[in-house]
Amino acid sequence: MNYELIRKDFPILTKTIYGKYPLVYLDNAATTQKPRQVVEAMTEEYYNVNANVHRGVHFLSQQATELHEGSRETVRKFLNARSASEIVFTRGTTESINLVAQCFSDAFMKEGDEVIVSEMEHHSNIVSWQLQQQRKGIRLRVIPITDDGQLRLDEYEKLFTDRTRIVSVTHVSNVLGTVNPVKEIIRIAHEHGIPVLIDGAQSTPHMKVDVQELDCDFFAFSGHKIYGPTGIGVLYGKEEMLEKLPPYMGGGEMIKNVTFERTTFNELPFKFEAGTPDYVASTGLARALDYVSSVGLDAIEAYERDLTAYAIQRMGEIEDMKIFGPADVSIHDAVISFQVGNIHHLDMGTLLDRLGIAVRTGHHCAEPLMHRLGIEGTCRASFAMYNTREEVDALVAAIKRVRQMF
Ligand code: 7TS
């Protein structure tokens, strides 16, 4: 993988911060930067194609529709879904999870029924279910983690009861970087006859995902975390599952016929896509997936794992450094949460920023995980395919400088 060539496609990476430091962008778990190919394809569509999709007989509308549905096919291939009707465009992982939480609980859950989540979930995979707790009285059961941030599969198996209806867990932790054994998690759930939703927000940018191989029932991810635009994401669902769920929102696109007495709903995936979709963002997402596929996810994974292992080793040399998450780098993805002595994470992040280094600080939308770890927050460096060992060295040097200030 040639990261020098890749970096040339991301204009923002040549920026200078505070007029003197080259940007070291290590906040990729929050959002990635965008290559020219993505931005230019979207600009081109606005300038030369723009028209609302699906409902037009005219030339531009047909062209825009072809682009939009072509993008759906690109997503289908990317996830290796069986059919494009299993690919629902949403605004992102959050909306995808909310859609499943609401529609699945409407179809299959009543008071006292249970969803299994884990202690390392992002708030979007906790609060979505809590909203159904308030609406319908469903209950959350939680898979605990080990001290080094791995799911306890022995405890997971014990959580299944005759009230369990669905399992909803993250593929990769956005705080710990833990790569969860989702295939095993899915296998165990299916042994109990229970479907599984995988939150793929932090896995899709870093490793090959094959939804048929995983055999997950639902899979969610966000465009903006995989070099695509904001405002678009994907929900994959097995056709037989999606068919059984009621619609999410009402409006145009999702209907077949409407009278004041009775409305019939459109076929998949349009049943879940009320209103004008972000058809320009879907083009951007497809070009981002093309970009990632042309580099190759195996190459990206190998490169980023090596970079992460290098960072863990170099950061480990710093006095008073605590790194959260698995010590085993084979299950530690491109996210490193850390704490240096008693330097507050906010102070660390702010001072690193002054040296041109962009990291994230705080609870990372995973407050229950912070409670489990007995901390308020961490400083988090997260990598993408354009990051380099030189940038890791710059991070290490900057952390050492900050440490000396205290
Ligand atoms: N799930 C996980 C595991 C995430 O990391 C995130 C976003 C989401 C869901 C929600 O994704 P969205 O695109 O719908 O917002 N995580 C982060 C983060 O770690 N820092 O900023 C956003």
Image: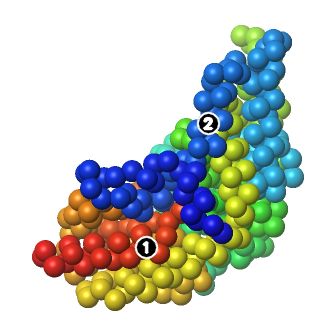
Give the quarter of the image for residue 205.
bottom right
Residue type beneath disc 1: Glu
Q: Is residue 152 visible?
A: no
Quadrant of the snapshot with the N terminus:
bottom right
Q: Nearer the viewer, residue 89 or 2?
A: 2
Q: Nearer the viewer, residue 148 or 129?
A: 148
Q: Secondary structure at mark 2?
A: helix
Please tell me whether residue 48 is drawn above or below residue 334 in the rendered image. above
Task: Count the labels in the image.
Answer: 2
Disc 1: CA contacts within 10 A as few (<14), some (14-19) or many (>=20): few
Calculate the distance from the C-alpha at mark 2 to the C-alpha at mark 1. Answer: 29 Å
Residue on which the image places disc 1: 390
**Residue 39 in view in this figure:** yes
The picture places residue 123, in percent across and down from the top left corner, at 45, 55
Asked which quadrant contains residue 72, the reply is top right
Mark 1 lies on a secondary structure that is: helix
**Does mark 2 have its CB less than 8 Å from ligand 1?**
no
For the point 81% across and 52% down, the residue is 77
Name the residue located 64 percent from the left edge and 52 percent from the top edge: 220
Q: Callout 2: few (<14), some (14-19), or many (20+) C-alpha neighbours within 10 Å?
A: few
User: In the rendering, at what x and y percent does residue 151 appear?
Assistant: 55, 78
**Residue furthest to the left:** 406
Work out whether mark 2 precedes mark 1 in sequence or the reverse, and give the earlier one: 2
Q: Quadrant of the C terminus?
A: bottom left
Q: Which residue is mark 2?
A: 40
| Residue in the picture at 60% in, 30% down | 43
